Image (cartoon, rainbow, N blue to C red):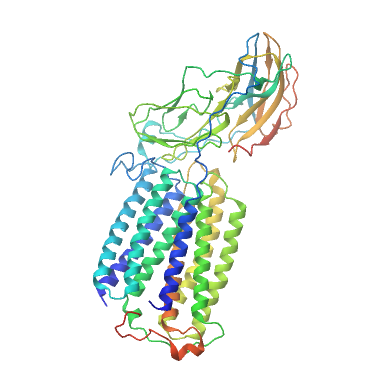
Amino acid sequence: MSKGLNRFAILVACATFFLIIAGALVTSNDAGLATSDWPLSNGQVFPKMVGNLFWEHGHRMVATTVGMLTIVLTIYILSKEKRQWVRRLGIFALLAVIAQGLLGGLTVKLMLPLAVSSAHATLAQLFFCTTVSLAVFTSRSWIEARPLPEEKGNLPLRYLCAAALVTIFLQLILGATLRHSATWDKPLPTELILAHVGGAFAVTFTLGGAAVSVLRRHKGESFLTRPAMIALGLLVVQLFLGLAAYLTRAASPKDPQPLNPMISITVAHVACGALVFATTIVLTLRTFRVLPASATDARMSHGLTPIKTDSY
Amino acid sequence: MNKQTKVWLVLSIALSLLALGSACTKSGTNTPAPETSSTAGAGPYSGPTGTISGVVAFNGTPPAPKKIDTTADPECGRKNPNLSTDDTIVKDGKLANVFIYVKEGSVEGGKKIGDYTWAAPSSEVQLDQNGCHYAPHVLGVLVNQKLKITNSDNTTHNIHPTPKLNAEWNQSQTAGAPPIEKAFTRAEVLIPVKCNQHPWMKAYIGVMKSPLFSVSGTDGAYEIKGVPPGTYTVVAWREGGAAGTEKTMQVTVPANGSAKADFAFGEGAATSLVKPSLQMMPAIEFPVLHNH
């Protein structure tokens, strides 16, 4: 295990989170087409950062930094990491960040069609998911984790958590589509708002159920309870942010330009959504790491001992 | 590779393919075919013409202009320290920037006005960016008429029309850059134009088949010249809400004469009758849902 690799993976995950915030600021400020150029801005590498170009070009600069960090991370993984599947995940991260950059260019060149913009926002979350996973897989706690003896409950926790994770991801796609379906000066489509609200109920039900089950069944196992607690706390914050984002966004068409608090609240809602997703990823991966698929599998769990193999 | 890794990789790849796949379903940027003349058309109109004129009023208290925050681009504040919204310009109860046009109707003799054709003039229409506002705020051009876009500000602007029928485009224009020349190939009322650099900057362009249109001035007055004698539906459009608001009026134009068509927007405008000098119907206000 390389402590340096793990720290660098955490750095990339944090930078990706910052990139998601930068991207959300572009959308909330309606700055996506502040320049018709790509990859340059108005034909320049460093244009004058005024008006909405500050947000759009700033986003490109952060994205370039994350791209560079990802290249270094992939090389780091390939040189230090012996587990084949982690090496492959590192390569996947690199491919994902390249695809994301190209999608970003397409959003500009095609003038923000809903499908491309939503795909760009969705792949951002998927890439974030990958970097968080790499940080988890290279951590000491992951490598040294011991299997828990039994699964106390009817439904295996790993599946409850995986269901929550998939639900959150679908909700993120819905949210991205909703955000890109109308600019700040136009009302959002009601059917998408309702779908996103329905998604919020689904996330509350699945994530709440999974996290509470973890807390009840594995009291004292901080390896599992800590991400469960954080996910629950973030979920509550996210629900309030969602309500505030709706109220401020509904009022924004009356404003002469995108203004606070609409900008800050909608961006906070996106950022908190990414954090809920990241925490649920950690929780889900850890349940897969230490818990068997079912009680009968408890004694047959595979690849969970901290021995130097290619499988942990 | 163990089972959990396979699950993880399959999930990641499937979702990324889903995201990328959805990106391939592009819509909205197809270049529309140029408008073609009807073979059954009546050709250019030649004969006596009349005039439609009137005044656009605003009933009630107009909304106060909203101050614009220019901290993101200080150049806008330097040139225009009191920069505010320009969507409702009312002076002495008269409303500017209303686009009035002949929508349809019959020319004396029975032919439809839409059957006649008008060639695009060689003169160009100018849209300037000045003080971080578009000037004029509302304008009309003929199909294929040249639109010349200039930048009088010492900052970069970004011209972005968002039409439904014409091709969408987006082009940055730095300070001191040469004018941008464009033309729209299909009739469309009205095309919103935005500046993605300065989100408050908006303009509206009516792309017309005929020159039978006008825009109300700061005194609310307008005049449409060269109207063939006949009975027409005249539309007055103003921005506001999701798609703007329209009022319609039936107007009969005599040969070598004039018809008066006054419009009113604002409070109670839907029921306040504007007394016509000729045959007119009460104005009806309804939101436009199809264009914007």
Q: Position of residue A298 (x, y in %)?
A: 46, 89
- The quadrant the N terminus of chain A occupies is bottom left
Identify whether B170 is placed above or below B178.
below
Q: Residue at x 55, y 70 (%)?
A: A204
Outermost residue to the front:
B39
Judging depth in this view, the residue of B126 and B182 nearest the camera is B182
Quarter location, residue B235:
top right
The mark total stands at 0
Kindly tell me whether residue A264 is visible in this rendering: no
Judging depth in this view, the residue of A298 and A218 nearest the camera is A298
Q: Is residue A195 left or right of residue A223?
A: right
Q: Is residue B281 left or right of residue A283?
A: right
Q: Position of residue A265 (x, y in %)?
A: 48, 56
Q: Residue at x 33, y 72 (%)?
A: A86
Q: Is residue A78 left or right of residue B253?
A: left
Judging depth in this view, the residue of A145 and A237 nearest the camera is A145
Kindly tell me whether residue A2 is visible in this rendering: yes
Q: Residue at x 36, y 51 (%)?
A: A59
Identify whether A119 is placed above or below B178.
below
Q: Position of residue A105 (x, y in %)?
A: 39, 48
Identify whether A82 is placed above or below B193.
below
Q: Residue at x 34, y 71 (%)?
A: A135
Q: Position of residue A177 (x, y in %)?
A: 52, 54
Identify whether B222 is placed above or below A147.
above
- The quadrant the C terminus of chain A occupies is bottom left
Judging depth in this view, the residue of A63 and A222 nearest the camera is A63
Quarter location, residue A88:
bottom left
